[in-house]
Amino acid sequence: TAPPQETTPSDAATPTTTTLTPLTFTVSGTAVELTYTAEVIPLQTPSGATPAPSQFVTATNDAIKSDPDTAAFAAIVQQMPDVINYLNASQSYIIFAPTNAEVISFLSSPSRRLRKRQEQKVFVAPNVVQQVVEKEAGLDQGVPSMGVVLQTTLKGQSKYSSLGKEEGTRVVMKEAASGNGTMMVVSGLGKETEVQKEGAQFDYGVVQKSNGFFALPQDLKSSLGLTQGKQFSDLLDKEGLLADLAGRSKMTLFAIPDSSSQKEQATKSTLERFVYDGLAYSPDLADGKCLKMRGGGTVSISRQQGGDILVNGAKVTKSDVIVKNGVVHYVEKVIFHPSESCAHS
C-alpha cells in the first residue's frame, strides 16, 4: 500500500488571459514593438512573504536589462514586476533570459494571437516565472557530472504545478551532449533548451542567456500522450492508477514507450512496480542507488561509463519528462525485480 501523501487541492490557481501593453525594445539598432497576449495565473508566494527590498529589485532588474540581446525578455519582466518583487532577497537566483530572437518567435505563435484584455491584479505569466530558478549552493564551482535539479519560482498549486503549496516546478540542468561548453536545461515534456554556461553575475545571482523559454509541465496523462507513452497511459488508466498518480503531489514513474516491442502484462500490482512515491530526477539516480517501489519491490540504479542509466538492467531511453507533480523516465523494457532486494536508499 502506498504511503499517504498530500493531494492536489481543488482550488488550484486557474489561468486566465491578458494582453500586456505593447513591448518596445531595440534589436540591432532597429526599434521593435510587439504585443504579448499571455496566459497568466495568480501570484502564489510563501506564507508571510513580503515585497523584496528595493535594492534587490533594482539590482535584479538592472542585471536582466544589461544585455541588449535579452532586451525583449527584460521588457516582459518590466510589465510583470511581481515576478521579481516577491523573490526572497536572501536567496541567490539564476535567471535564464531568452534572447530577443527567441522571444519574437515565442510571441509569434498562433496560440498567442491578440485577445480582449482582461484587467487583473497580481497576475504573472507562468512562462516568465519559470525562467527564474533558485541557485543551488556550489554551482559557482560548476554543474555536477550527473546534472543538478533546480527549483523554479513557479510555485504553488496551479495548472502547471502540484508538488506542494510552497514548492516550485523543477528543471534539470546538465552539460549539453554536444560538448561545446554550453548547458542544457530539461523542462516540461522533456524539452531541452540550450543555455549559456557563463552569465552576467550580479549581487543576487546570475543572468544566463537561453535559446528559448522552458516548457511548462503538463498533467501526467497529457505528458505521456505527447511523449510516446499513450499505450502505457492506457494501461494505467485501465487499472485505475492514472488518476491516482495524477492526484499525488510527488511521484516518479518508469514507463515503457509505445515504440518498445516488450509490453507489460498489465495488472495493478505489476504496474505499481514502475512507481516510486517520491521525486527522482536523473541527477538523483546515482550509481548504486536503490528505490523502494510502490509494488513492494525495489529497483537498483546503475550508471554506465558512457552516461547511460540502467534500472534493474533496463536502459533509460529518455529521462526527465517533467510533469506537474513529478517526473517520468522511459525504460526500454519491463523492470523485473531482483531475486534479492537491494538496500533502500
Image (spheres, grey):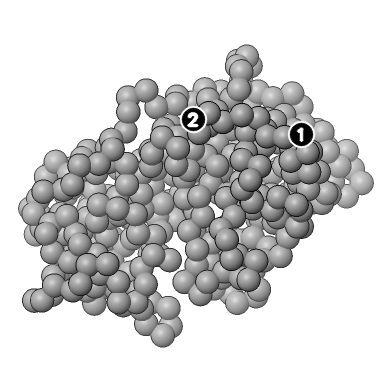
Relative to 323, residue 198 above or below: below
Residue 161 horizontal side relative to residue 111, left or right = left
Name which residue lies at 71% across and 65% down.
Answer: 198
Q: Which sits earlier in the primary sequence, circle 2 or circle 1?
A: 2
- Residue, disc 2: 47
Residue 310 image offset from top left, x and y in percent: 30, 75
- Of 307 and 257, the residue lying toward us: 307
Quadrant in which the C terminus appears: bottom left
Name which residue lies at 74% across and 37% down.
Answer: 57
Q: Quadrant of residue 274?
A: bottom left
Q: Residues within 10 Å of mark 2 (few under 14, many from 20)?
A: few
The residue under label 2 is which amino acid type? Ser
Direction bottom: furthest residue: 305
Q: Quadrant of residue 126?
A: top right
Q: Which mark is residue 54?
A: 1
Residue 75 horizontal side relative to residue 290, left or right = right
Name which residue lies at 50% across and 50% down.
Answer: 151
The residue under label 1 is which amino acid type? Ser
Q: Which mark is residue 283?
A: none
Q: Could you say whether the residue bearing mark 1 is in a helix, strand or loop?
A: helix
Q: Quadrant of residue 118?
A: top right
Direction right: furthest residue: 29
Q: Is residue 42 visible?
A: yes
Relative to 11, residue 174 above or below: below
**Exactly how many numbered labels are in the figure?**
2
Q: Residues within 10 Å of mark 1 (few under 14, many from 20)?
A: few
Q: Could you say whether the residue bearing mark 2 is in a helix, strand or loop?
A: loop
Give the Cα separation between the discs numbered 2 and 1: 20 Å
Residue 180 horizontal side relative to residue 317, left or right = right
- Of 44 and 192, the residue lying toward us: 44
